[in-house]
Amino acid sequence: AEQTEFEWRGRDRAINAMYGIYYGASLAAIFDLSDAAAAGIPLVTGGIWMLGPAFNPKKYEGITESTMRAANTGKILGLVNGGSLGFAVAGNSEENYKVVLALSTIGSITLGEIAFQTQKKKNIPGGKIEIMRHYGFLGTGVGGAALAATNTDNAHLIGVGLLAGGISGLLIGNKVANKYDYTRGDVDALSSLGVSSAGIGFAVIANA
């Protein structure tokens, strides 16, 4: 059953802090900040993200575990797809890492907030959130595997392939979730089976 009141756990605050640290570290790298600033800014942003509920308690009123799960799903998928877009845009340029960091940060913050607000308003079933996460990662993984088979070192192509895989995964995940009423347990089983199958596949390839 969906819980009616969300209680912040140490794990939830730690996850928020980790994202904040990543965003701050990205900012420091993008602007080539000095050693002191580069070390301090991630700690500041990590603290801000960890203390978000204290800074803006109204935003977090009435949330559930699924709200935070949706937000974290949006953050990680936004980071991955934003980084892929960065590779697609910057290619093999000398400072492509700055574009990748910038777009991964923007994507993570943006998609995380969209997912948070959508889940807060619509209360989407937990199974759908999990299936979107599953297919989002699966799509990126399939895109990466296809690229690995080509042995390409073209960053533009790598970025396009990963982004196409990630977006395709989300689209497929949305269709699957709308068609079947999956639970979180169902998706955990699917994910475990997928990891096991991938491991068997790599083992076969390694011994071929």
Image: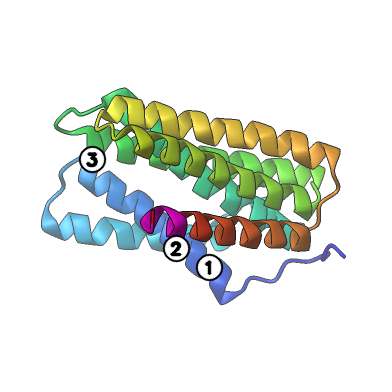
Q: Secondary structure at mark 1?
A: helix
The residue lying furthest to the front in this view is 208
Say which residue appears at 61% left-offset and 55% top-offset. Answer: 194
Pointers 1 and 2 in contact (C-beta within 8 Å): yes
User: Is 205 included in the stretch rendered in magenta?
Assistant: yes
**Residue beneath disc 3:** 30
185 with respect to 9 (left or right): right
- Above or below, 205 against 91 in this view is below
Q: Earlier in the sequence, mark 3 or mark 1?
A: 1
Q: Is residue 58 visible?
A: no
Amino acid on which the number 2 mark rests in the picture: Ala
Amino acid on which the number 3 mark rests in the picture: Ile
User: What is the chief secondary structure element of the magenta stretch?
Assistant: helix
Report the disc number at residue 13: 1
Q: In the picture, residue 184 is in which quadrant?
A: bottom right
Amino acid on which the number 1 mark rests in the picture: Arg
Q: Which residues are magenta?
A: 202-207
Q: Is residue 153 visible?
A: yes
Say which residue appears at 84% left-offset and 38% top-offset. Answer: 179
Say which residue appears at 66% left-offset and 44% top-offset. Answer: 132
**Residue beneath disc 2:** 17
Pointers 3 and 1 in contact (C-beta within 8 Å): no
